[in-house]
Every structure is written in structure tokens, then in C-alpha cells.
Image (spheres, coloured by chain):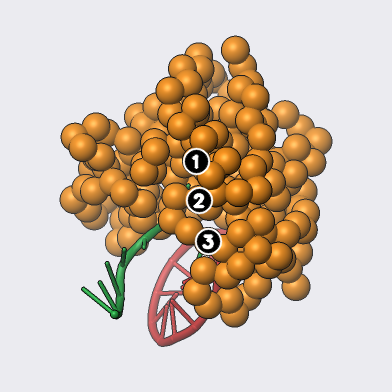
Chain colours: A orange, B green, C red
Amino acid sequence: MTSWPTQWPSTAAELVAVQQDLAVARPEPWHPGRHHVIGGCYACGPHGLVGRGQAGDPVWAAAAAYSGEQCVSRASVSGVARGPYTPGLLALRVGPSLAAAVTALTVAVDVLIVDATGRDHPRRAGLAMQLGASVGVPTIGVTHRPLTAVGAPPADQRGATSPLTVNGAVVGYWLRTRTGTRPVAVHAGWRVDAETAVQIVLGSARWRTPTPLREARRLARVRRR
DNA sequence: GCGACAG
DNA sequence: ATCTTGTCGC
């Protein structure tokens, strides 16, 4: 099974049900090959938005695909949030827009970096996992901080890691992508374990944020303007 | 009661 | 999400 039938619910109760199904899904693990196309996707809302927002808020999302240092496809879309931001229910807000941006890419990506958590989630089914299941692509989460997981910061040296755990289970790692800069939280996602996620993110991070995600973020903000 | 809490 | 300052890479 490569893809997993996921919808994008419009209510919290339906989304929770989808997450509960995702949490027990056992898709085939993905392993990186010698060469691969790495995608990144990102979503943002109105610039000055304060608080949780609400249903109907505009959303801008973008995706970028890289083969090595070369960007081989870009796409951006605009959409509408189906609810306010609630920790654990981010998919309600930006899930459909992210999926639209990713499917608008003209090049197939082997693995996708998402600005969201994966197994680090109250129901162990964060947006990175749901997006991967929805579009049928292995995913990795990269965020500024964990949602529910905890872990000591890593040494101040590029490549240093420290585990992020929830109830003793490793769901991701803090990863120092640049010496002297705050680490990023790297999350196991759809078909990608935490160790593989770190390997992919470090290899694609010339700056603090991995390049495909950095470019998607830039594009989404340009689209918003 | 308050803040914190992926974006 | 977004605010900030300084710094670095392009």
C-alpha cells in the first residue's frame, strides 16, 4: 500500500477520527536511495493574524521540489481555513491547501518535508503524517519546536542531535543544522522513521531551514503579497 | 482563573 | 502564524 485513503474533514470530530485511523496504519517504510527529489511545503495565514484565527481565514500554501541544489518545480495556491488553529487540529486549517500545493507540482517528489509534526501529536498522527497519506508520498516534519514531545537541546555543533520523546518513545530529534543557531525539531512522518528524517534534513539544510522548505515558505509569502 | 500549545 | 536584532550567505 503506497497511499492511504485520507480525506480532509471540515469538523474537529471527523478529523480526530481520521487521526485515530492514521495512528494505527502500518504503511511500508521508505528508505532513501542514492538520488532523490526532495519536496518542501509550507502554509501561512494573514500577515498580522493574532490568536487562533477562525474558519474562513485566507490561507496561502506553496511547494517546491529539489534535485540536489536545483529547484525543478514550484507551485503556490490560495485557499480558505476550515477552522481556527487548535493544537492537534492544524490539518483543519491548512491541510487541504498544502495538499493542493503539493499536487500542483509538475515533478514527482520522493520525499516531502512539511512544516508540521508527525508522530509528535496527541493522537500520534500530526499533519505531516496525514499529508503524506493523503498525497501518497513519504513525509518528514520540520518545526521550530515540538508539540507534545520533550527532549534536551543538542550540542552546539552542526549535525548534533538529541531525542524527542513522548512517553519514552522517540518520535523525532532536535537537530542542529548550523553551529551557533537554534536547532530544528525533526519529526518522523508518513513511512519515514526519525533517524531517516534526520539524515534527509541535514543533507538538504544549507541554512537552518532545509532548502525545499525554505523555498516553499518564501513562495507562500510572495503569493500572499 | 491563567498561560502554554505544530501553524 | 507574527513580532524582534544582528549576522551571514546569496
Check residue A85 in the rendering and tell me which mark sits there, or answer none.
Answer: 3
Circle nearer the N terminus (2, 1)? 1
> How far across and how far down the image is residue A185, in percent?
37, 48
Q: Chain of mark 2?
A: A
Residue type for callout 2: Leu
Q: In the image, which disc is placed on residue A89?
A: 2
Nearest to the observer: residue A54 or residue A216: A54
Q: CA distance from mark 2 to mark 1?
A: 8 Å
In the rendered view, tell whether residue A48 sits above or below residue A207.
Answer: below
Mark 1 → mark 3, Cα distance in angstroms: 14 Å
Q: Quadrant of the N terminus of chain A?
A: top right
| Mark 1 and mark 3 on one chain | yes
- The residue that disc 1 covers is A16
For image coordinates 76% across by 32% down, the residue present is A107
Of A168 and A178, the residue lying toward us: A168
Amino acid type of the residue that numbered disc 3 sits on in the rendered structure: Tyr
Is A81 positioned to the left or the right of A191 in the image?
right
Q: Chain of mark 1?
A: A
Residue A138 is at least partly visible in this image = yes
Mark 2 vs mark 1: in front: 1
Q: 10 Å neighbourhood of mark 3: few (<14), some, or many (≥20)?
A: some
